[in-house]
Image: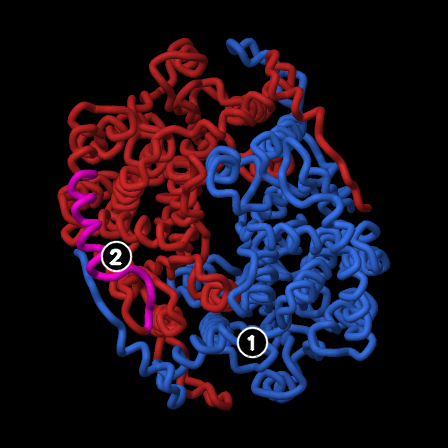
Chain colours: A blue, B red
């Protein structure tokens, strides 16, 4: 994996940050790296996430899911960080096992999914650290009932990932369900390299050892200079550009297999860095599709965006057949991959020519190893950005208010936040 | 459909725009409405889009696709506005016919899709106004060859939507393919209510007449005051908030069926309004899922966002089974829909309590009629915003540069933009 910062430098045609300013920033990167290393060594909350390539035991995960022989589908019931990491892996990689995610409480979507599954050959992978997340437990209760209705013993088909105590832990103990603990000190959005992200991938037959190897390769590259570490290079320039007005970061992979990765990145970036009135807003984009829409805004709208272009340099390809269609002969003999690459380079040049900064990230391939590299690098980039911005990267207080209000509204306790819901102002146009 | 502006008013706890300022803006809405009406009457480019509820003939669309009896799948080959409108409808509505979209040139994704289809019972719906869009034609050539390889006569399975002349028109004439013309004066991103958006929906068995009826109902509500038209209410407050620093607009439906609608909205908003250094950046969000991630940023990050909350007031529901799990008894007896509604209201109140503006849009139901209302209202809102901001809503010049560069790179002509690609600056960290 490599990161190319050429188009963020403040040189014509692109405009961003000067090389001299990056050199000065590098001194702060050294200090931030030192802080991160101390946090990791002490196993501090959050920093511990960056130790997962070594602390996660893939054999234990394989062993825990080995009870489920040849499933047709895996349904992961979780929300936010309990689902997106696993979805990033299983959506990117091909498998004969269908991976689904109940990460919302939309009744129509839940019903549609349950109707489409052969529950007798489906594994349910329930993920909640606390064991009390309302959405997750509600969905789990619905799935469990659907299994009962279908004559399937849910205790034979359920895998649990949860904390050391709580509802789900008790349930797993009572019914002797296979289960693994959520590691301590790892917030949900940083948990993809633990059992939270890897159990579903293992159930789908993916090489979770290679995911961890890719992550470890990027871990080994963390150093006290942004010029020596792809992860820090990305984190440092994102921060430097945000300081210079690029308050938005469009994550734009040129691979459909990485569409869910953009969502995962958006969660990581928004929830970690969006606090204290600060934070660079992640935009989810997809090349080449969004060239035909979002690019208009990125190139000609406000000067407030960094565009992150991601691609794999190796992939399976499809030849474009020769044609005598008028004006299209140039396509014959090339391939869809050639076309995609041309669009990638054209978009990058198009942004540069308009003075808009972009970063290019290249993986060798979208496979287990490459995903491990990419996911770890983005996590380390985010942690570095948080240090440089002096925010508390590993908390999410603004998410909690709404949880209390929703619980109060449903009669799950007396929360003053629920009262605020009743006081809504209205100005209705119908 | 109704739009509630209560939480954009500049009153505690929410902060946005004062009622007095909205009243003053309403004078400009009257002038903009007058301009829009004149454009519609004269059939001017772009404005013509708002006439589609009356000018589109659904019977002609039904007739044109009637040759295809009971398909198992419809593959729409198009990109940008040629695909997203149709996808918004077919992704929102249930059907026995699978709708797929080749709106990218990712070889691995194309191959995966073609491998999964029974081509003999698949309809290919090719959409390109010019008939020369590189991505669309390349994909079409690949699909055509796959059909030949499978022993399927592609001329029996192909429907064409294109302009009055060009490659695809010639092809349709030569092989007597069923086809319909793209209406004049309607940019791709405004074409969902024409054959471009409706042919795929008709092939999937949806009630396209009801889509047009819903749109017509919103068309009838356009008036010279934002307080009398849901569409203008939304367009005007989005503009007013952008002027006050809310440079981002998070479109957050609480329905998985509307996930593609957010993408469609993002295209409409970005490509229409992102120009001349202006433009409100659309963010694609999904409730309740993104409450567990993006909401942290929306509530506690920079004060630069409007959040648009969308829901349907009627839907199918799923009861949550009673449970004796510790602390979760409150969930039993309620439903997933109740939970989703509680989350919706909690998020809205959570934003208001932090002084962050939001708009609430409510449909009766996510069905053909409701989608027609919603899509038309967003288009009219966008056109109004463009008038208020004095931008040229219906052009997309910044998209063209990259197209020329890509074409040059592929040897499809001599374009100076391609040379810029070679001059890229590099600063690689690996």
- Is any part of residue B314 visible from this angle? no
By secondary structure, the bulk of the magenta-drawn segment is best described as helix
Q: Percent from the top left, x then y, of residue B167?
A: 45, 13
> Alpha-carbon neighbours of circle 1 within 10 Å: few (<14), some, or many (≥20)?
some
Q: Which residue is drawn at 43% across and 24% down?
A: B128
Q: Which residue is drawn at 64% across and 27% down?
A: A342
What's the magenta region? B13-32
Q: In this view, does A96 lie above or below B403?
A: below
Tag shown at residue A421? none
User: Would you say B165 lies left or right of A152 here?
Assistant: left
> Alpha-carbon neighbours of circle 2 within 10 Å: few (<14), some, or many (≥20)?
some
User: Would you say A301 lies left or right of A157 here?
Assistant: left
Q: Please tell me whether mark 1 or mark 2 is closer to you in this view.
A: 2
Q: In this view, does B169 lie above or below B317?
A: above
Residue B89, image quadrant:
top left
Q: Percent from the top left, x then y, of residue B247?
A: 42, 51
Q: Name the residue under label 1.
A: A153
Foreground pick, A231 / A411: A231
Q: Mark 2 points at which residue?
A: B363
Query: Considering the numbered disc 2 on the image, is that residue within a helix, a strand or a loop?
Result: strand
């Amino acid at each position: 994996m490599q990161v190319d910062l050429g188009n963020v430098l403040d040189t014509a045609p692109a405009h961003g940050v000067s090389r001299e300013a990056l050199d000065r920033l590098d001194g702060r990167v050294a200090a931030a790296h030192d802080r991160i290393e101390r946090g990791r060594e002490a196993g501090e909350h959050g920093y511990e996430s960056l130790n997962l390539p070594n602390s996660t035991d893939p054999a234990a995960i394989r062993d825990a899911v080995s009870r489920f022989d040849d499933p047709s589908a895996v349904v992961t019931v979780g929300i936010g960080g309990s689902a997106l990491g696993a979805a990033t892996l299983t959506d990117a990689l091909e498998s004969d096992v269908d991976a689904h995610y109940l990460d919302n409480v939309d009744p129509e979507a839940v019903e549609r999914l349950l109707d489409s599954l052969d529950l007798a050959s489906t594994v349910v992978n329930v993920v909640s650290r606390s064991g009390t997340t309302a959405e997750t437990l509600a969905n789990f209760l619905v799935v469990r009932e659907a299994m009962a209705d279908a004559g399937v013993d849910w205790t034979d088909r359920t895998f649990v990932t949860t904390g050391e105590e709580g509802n789900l832990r008790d349930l797993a103990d009572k019914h002797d369900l296979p289960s693994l603990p959520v590691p301590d000190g790892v917030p949900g959005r940083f948990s993809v390299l633990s059992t939270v992200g890897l159990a579903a991938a293992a159930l789908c037959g993916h090489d979770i050892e290679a995911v961890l190897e890719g992550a470890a390769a990027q871990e080994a590259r963390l150093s006290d200079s942004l010029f020596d570490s792809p992860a820090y290079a990305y984190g440092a320039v994102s921060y430097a550009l945000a300081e210079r007005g690029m308050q938005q970061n469009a994550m734009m992979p040129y691979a459909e297999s990485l569409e869910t990765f953009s969502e995962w990145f958006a969660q990581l970036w928004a929830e970690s860095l969006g606090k204290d009135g600060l934070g660079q807003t992640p935009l989810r984009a997809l090349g080449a599709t969004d060239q035909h829409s979002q690019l208009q805004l990125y190139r000609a709208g406000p000067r407030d965006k960094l565009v992150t272009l991601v691609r794999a340099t190796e992939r399976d390809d499809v030849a474009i057949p020769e044609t005598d269609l008028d004006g299209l002969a140039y396509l014959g003999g090339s391939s869809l991959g050639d076309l995609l690459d041309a669009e990638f380079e054209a978009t990058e040049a198009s942004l540069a020519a308009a003075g808009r900064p972009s970063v290019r990230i290249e993986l060798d391939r979208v496979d287990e190893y490459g995903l491990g590299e990419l996911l770890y690098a983005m996590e380390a980039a985010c942690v570095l950005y948080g240090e440089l911005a002096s925010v508390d990267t590993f908390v999410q207080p603004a998410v909690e208010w709404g949880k209390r209000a929703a619980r109060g509204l449903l009669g799950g306790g007396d929360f003053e936040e629920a009262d605020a819901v009743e006081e809504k102002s209205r100005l209705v146009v119908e």
